[in-house]
Image (spheres, rainbow, N blue to C red):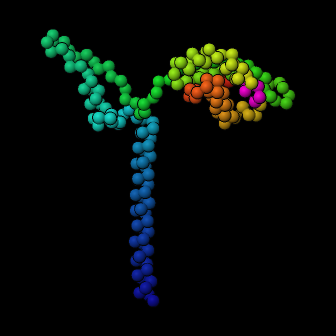
């Protein structure tokens, strides 16, 4: 009996040392992962560490793009005017400014109003011209939509995001095709 107790006593410190080593190893890995995530999201410049499609590092592509200078005239090479490498390709979009709209809200007391200004991001410059051509319809649709809202619906961030989506849907309805990408509030006052 005494021999078994001595054997069990010898295994306990070995198990606890193994647990401590595993915990320390886990914490080190977690710390390294946190440092990498911090660098990636906070300190990294856009495009840094990315490879262009050809497989050469971005810095090498920038150096290759630099003109070598004119060997015949002896002129020094000019500094490179390279385009920055971005994380994601972005499609060309256009912005349309909508005039500010002021409406009474649909509250029971009827003493609150909303003044809102918006910028509309659209997929093509043609969509901007179409929005300008349809300005009375656009303004009417926005006024009808906004005047049906209450203060409670618009006071939260979710309510504002829902309103952006509803405005985009109405504008796409007027344009006939989904060309509105995003709505930006440039002014939003509720009193």
Quadrant assignment, res 17: bottom left
**Number of callouts:** 0
Asked if one can make out residue 144 in the rendered structure from this viewpoint, the answer is yes
Residue closest to the far top: 73
Task: Check the picture and name the quadrant holding the N terminus.
Answer: bottom left
Q: Is residue 147 magenta?
A: yes
The image position of residue 14, as x and y in percent, is 40, 71
User: Is most of the magenta stretch helix, strand or loop?
Assistant: helix
Viewer-side residue, 123 vs 182? 123
Judge from the rendering whether residue 138 lies leftward or rightward of residue 89; answer left or right: right
Q: Nearer the viewer, residue 82 or 95?
A: 95
Does residue 185 show up?
no
Residue 109 lies, in percent from the top left, at: 86, 28
148 left or right, relative to 60: right
Q: Is residue 58 above or below residue 33?
A: above
Q: Residue at x 43, y 65 (%)?
A: 19
Q: Residue at the far front: name it.
A: 176
**Residue 94 screen position, x and y as percent:** 52, 21
| Front in this rendered view, residue 26 or 132 | 132
Q: Quadrant of residue 134?
A: top right
Give the residue drawn at x 76%, y 34%.
152
Magenta segment range?
145-149
158 inside magenta stretch: no
Q: Residue furthest right?
A: 109
Q: Given the current orientation, which residue lies at the most extreme bottom position?
A: 1
Quadrant where the C terminus lies? Answer: top right
Position of residue 68 measured from the top left corner of the image (x, y, whole percent): 20, 19
Quarter of image, res 160:
top right
Q: Which residue is depicted at the point 37% across and 26% down?
A: 84
The residue shown at (44%, 43%) is 37
């Amino acid at each position: 009996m005494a021999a078994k107790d001595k054997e069990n006593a010898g295994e306990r410190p070995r198990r606890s040392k193994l647990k401590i080593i595993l915990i320390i190893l886990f914490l080190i890995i977690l710390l390294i992962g946190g440092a990498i995530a911090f660098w990636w999201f906070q300190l990294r410049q856009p495009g840094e560490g990315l490879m262009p499609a050809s497989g050469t590092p971005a810095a090498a592509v920038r150096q290759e793009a630099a003109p070598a200078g004119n060997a015949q005239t002896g002129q020094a090479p000019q500094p490179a005017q390279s385009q920055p490498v971005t994380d994601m390709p972005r499609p060309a979009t256009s912005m349309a400014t909508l005039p500010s709209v002021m409406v009474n809200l649909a509250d029971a007391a009827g003493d609150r109003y909303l003044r809102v200004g918006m910028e509309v991001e659209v997929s093509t410059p043609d969509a901007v011209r179409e929005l300008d051509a349809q300005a009375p319809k656009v303004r009417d649709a926005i006024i009808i939509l906004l005047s049906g809202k209450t203060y409670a619906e618009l006071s939260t961030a979710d309510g504002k995001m829902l309103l952006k989506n509803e405005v985009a849907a109405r504008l796409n309805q007027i344009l006939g095709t989904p060309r509105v990408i995003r709505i930006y509030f440039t002014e939003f006052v509720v009193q």
